[in-house]
Amino acid sequence: MPEMTVTVRWPDGRVADCYSPSLVMHDHLSPGSTYRVDDFTRRSATALAEASERVRAKYGFACTASAASFERIQTTASTFDAADLVEVLAMHPPLPQENS
């Protein structure tokens, strides 16, 4: 199962990496985009829950690293106002380019 890292800049300028055990984060966030803290937290919760379920489906157990990643996001997000902005700086690996 491909793992990925989402690099974000929090409203106070801190840059952090968020781990996901699945590329599903690409379905919920886009590199170069900015999200309100509450929206980023909601999107991350949904994506990381989906990622954990993919791990469960494949290996028979949920991904604790995914839960820990969301816990770090929640903890950091709680220090900002809901309307503050989080910027997604990068998502690695990127999705493969589709042929036109």
Image (cartoon, rainbow, N blue to C red):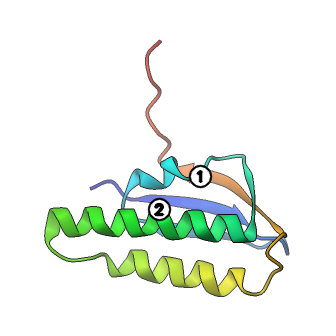
**For the N terminus, which image quadrant?**
bottom left
Residue drawn at the location 39% of the way across and 78% of the way down = 65
**Mark 1 in CB contact with mark 2 (< 8 angstroms):** yes
Query: Would residue 98 appear left or right of 17 to someone viewing this image?
Result: left
Relative to 97, say whether 72 is above or below: below
Residue drawn at the location 57% of the way across and 62% of the way down = 43
Question: Which circle's residue, 1 or 2, is located before the other in the chain?
Answer: 1
Relative to 20, say whether 23 is above or below: above
Relative to 61, say whether 29 is above or below: above
Viewer-nearest residue: 65 or 43: 43
Q: How far is mark 1 from mark 2, CA to CA?
A: 9 Å
Q: Position of residue 57 (x, y in %)?
A: 18, 64
Q: Which residue is mark 2?
A: 47
Amino acid under disc 1: Leu
Amino acid under disc 2: Ala
Q: Which mark is residue 29?
A: 1
| Residue neighbourhood size for the residue with mark 1, other residues' Cα within 10 Å, grouped as few (<14), some (14–19), many (≥20) | some
Residue drawn at the location 50% of the way across and 48% of the way down = 26
Query: What is the secondary structure assignment of the residue under circle 2?
Result: helix
Query: Would residue 76 appear left or right of 2 to someone viewing this image?
Result: right
Query: Picture quarter containing residue 76?
Result: bottom right
